[in-house]
Image (cartoon, rainbow, N blue to C red):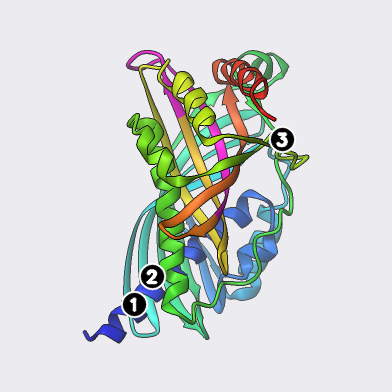
Amino acid sequence: MDESQKIRELLDREQIREAFNRYAFGVDSSDAEAVLSVFDDPCTLITQQPGKPPRHYEGRAAVERFFNKAVNNDMKLLRHRITDHLIKVNGDRADARLYWDEIREQNGQLILGGGIYFDKLRRIGDGWKFTERHALSTYWISLIDKVDEGALATRVLLAPRPKHVRVWGRIVEHKELQVLLDKFAVQETAVRYAAGADQRRWDLWEEIFTDPIELFLSPRSQETRKISRTKWIELEKGIVESYAATQHALSNFMIEVEGDKAVCQVYVQARHFVKDTDSHDGYGYYTFHMIRAADGWKINKYGITLKAQDQNHRENLRRTMKIVTEHLK
């Protein structure tokens, strides 16, 4: 494989991963148009529950009917996290396998589930679309049998589920290697953010933040406040290191690059351990705004949108925000 072929395969893999992410964001925000934008015509969808035979939806019309009905629901929460992508590209065709985990509120229950996607894709112009997606469920666990007012007050906080949130444009057309390299660099900056906190590597935060930085006070209002990089690291260090350990698992990266600016939206599963097994958990997504600097991409503005969290995490977040707002300009 020569150099140009290697670059072409890297571009293909990135475009295929973006199709995965567009599908997940579309389902979670009830955006049937976004979901269907990554399916070919003709196409096949296969769904399969544990211990049951598969159900086939053959043809574009059948797949459209399925998603137009499936994504328009009244669930209070639906969130997919996709990981462990295995992709094999063969010319204009590709096969892929990846894990997915989801948490959902359905019929009054809070459910944790997941499985494996088995995908076949075809190159369409400068993008990739599913010719077949087989969603195989491998586990289904009821976390709370009845999500009533009592549970919402004491065990879990569910933010209003977004509906028809815009999933950025059509599949991004990668015409130059620089676009791909920028996306990889932006993703690495986000990963270094999580690693810096979890590994107590505050020197990484010194490298990835501008000075000052802007923090979103509320994802709804988009209101921001500035704070010096040194002060922000000092505040976060005191909060994070009050726990025995933390883990911020990032997945489903959606990245847009425009010149020297970028926006990265990425799912996060945040766990803050008081003891070995006792943790305060939150689920949502970060929105990182970055700018290109001489030594790489840096975060100049960011915030977190939480979609679900337990009572302990909610109380701790309130205490944290009280401390933080006292130091914001």
In front of the other: 164 or 126: 126
Quadrant (top left, top right, bottom left, bottom right) of the C terminus: top right
Residue 159 x %, y %: 69, 32
The three-letter code of the residue at mark 1 reads: Glu
**Tag 1 residue:** 9
In front of the other: 140 or 254: 254
99, above or below 110, in the image:
below
Label 1 sits on a secondary structure element that is helix
Residue 218, label in figure = 3
Residue lying farthest left? 1
For the residues carrying marks 1 and 3, which lies nearer the camera in this image?
3
**Tag 2 residue:** 13
Residue 317 x %, y %: 59, 21
Q: Residue at x 61, y 75 (%)?
A: 60
Magenta: main secondary structure: strand
In the image, taking residue 115 as reference, residue 127 lies left or right, namely: right
Residue 139 x %, y %: 41, 39
Whether 273 is among the magenta residues is yes
Whether 184 is among the magenta residues is no
Asked if the residue under mark 3 is in contact with the one under mark 1, i.e. CB atoms within 8 Å, the reply is: no
Asked if the residue under mark 1 is in contact with the one under mark 2, i.e. CB atoms within 8 Å, the reply is: yes
Q: Residue at x 65, y 23 (%)?
A: 147
The three-letter code of the residue at mark 2 reads: Arg
Residue 162 x %, y %: 71, 45
Q: Which residues are magenta?
A: 271-290
214, above or below 11, in the image:
above
For the residues carrying marks 2 and 3, which lies nearer the camera in this image?
3
Is residue 106 visible in the rendered structure shown here?
yes
240, above or below 139, in the image:
above
Q: Residue at x 35, y 29 (%)?
A: 200
Mark 2, Cα crowd under 10 Å, few <14 / some 14-19 / many 20+, is: many
What's the CA distance linking mark 1 and mark 3? 40 Å
